[in-house]
Amino acid sequence: MIGPAHRTPAGPITLSGIGVHTGKRSTVTIRPAEVGTGIRFVRTDLPDAEEIPARLEYVLGTDLGTTIGHDEVNRVLTVEHLMAGLSAAGISTATIEIDGSEPPILDGSFLPYLNAILEVGTRTLEGEVPVIRVRKPLHLEAGEGTSYIVTPGSGLRVAGAIEFEHPAVGRQFGSFELTPDTFLDDIAPARTFGFEDQAETLRSRGLAQGSSLENTVVIGRDGVMNEALRFPDEFLRHKVGDLIGDFALLGARFEGQIVIERPSHAGNVALARKLEIESRRSGEGDAIVDAQKILQYLPHRYPMLLVDRVTHFEPGRRIVGVKNVTINEPFFQGHYPGHPIMPGVLIIEAMAQVGGLLLMDTIENPDEKVVYFMSLNNVKWRRPVTPGDQLIFELELLQFRRSICKMRGEGFVDGALVAEAELMARVVDR
């Protein structure tokens, strides 16, 4: 779907309209941003509102749309159409200002967002978008007949089916090789849809307040109430577009083949989370930073250098590093004889060293700096680490102001969480 380079809009993009669920008018402005910030929403109608990263960890709900945010006030509903347009245009970095809680539904498809972005164009930024590839088949059952099968493959192909009892829909099946051109032609025009007999129930729940024949394919008792469908299988194609929009919350490019059965927003998000977890915990990624480069950035040396390589790196945002734990580690001689266990403080030390590598790319002259850790909070050890384990550390930069930063880190072995902590550090001259 997207190229390897980070991209941002070449200029601001503004669209206005009503939200399909809130029924309230809002204006969205998509602005260029710098590499490392990712895609972030800002509620301009809320004074001093904290930015909302368009990431899986900020998903608050998946009821007839995907909602992201920090809480019930500072949140944005139904982001999937906008996110799909950004993804199809190759945009990985942008600031999205919105003066309400829901982006405009426009005509109910992904096309208005994508066309607006293509009209303005994009600008290439430094660095490469992370790529998630599966190395073995994955299967996910998400309830109510929703299921996904993911297999390795180049590019992105989505095949699948939806099924509704109404004869206007029935069972629809299709397969799509998704490139920027095929998304524009075959997926983007497909509109959201709903059933007339469910409208009253939805509105009593505060949903579908802005739904109409102008922005929704409405299926009544006698069939489709709109003038015409844009595709015979428009319902299936819209579900594929929703998947792309939800997958954009990965903050990465995905390559592989996905077979979907009765997909849902809840299922899409669950699958994206599973793929992210499998990717970041596998430790099988190519080294972005190897042992020799690590020596250039970290002052530590044997026996206190506890990072072997870095497999994922998003400047100023996120890093994944690897520590291979062998029986030859010097601390096993005394901790404990006959029952070797890696000391918990050294697990956190290794985590901190990976975090230090993340910081070194955010400052000038990193070879002249050193990171001093000031505090640890919410430290937890979940299970022992023993010889033969491979520790995978993931750290996210939460805040960086005036040389003081705050990070959150997690350590995994074979996909299981073994340690977590919040770390605060200061960057100082050597």
Image: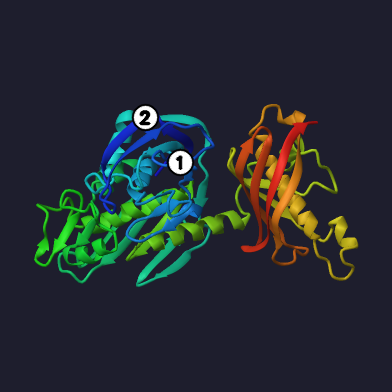
The residue labelled by disc 1 is 39
**Residue lying furthest front in this view?**
47
- Which residue is nearer to you in this view: 390 or 341? 341
The image shows residue 74 at horizontal and vertical percentages of 44, 48
Label 2 element class: loop
The image shows residue 116 at horizontal and vertical percentages of 29, 35
When asked about the image quadrant of residue 91, the answer is top left
Q: Is residue 260 left or right of residue 281?
A: left
Please determine whether, in this image, residue 278 is positioned above or below residue 74: below
- Which residue is nearer to you in this view: 422 or 11? 422
Q: Amino acid at mark 1?
A: Ile
Crowding at dot 2, Cα within 10 Å, few <14 / some 14-19 / many 20+, comes out as: some
The residue labelled by disc 2 is 12
Q: Amino acid at mark 2?
A: Pro
Tell me which label, 2 or 1, sits earlier in the chain: 2
The image shows residue 29 at horizontal and vertical percentages of 35, 35
* Residue pictured at 65% horizontal, 46% vertical: 407
- Which residue is nearer to you in this view: 96 or 412? 96
Q: Is residue 138 left or right of residue 163?
A: right
When asked about the image quadrant of residue 325, the answer is bottom right
Residue 127 visible (yes or no) = yes
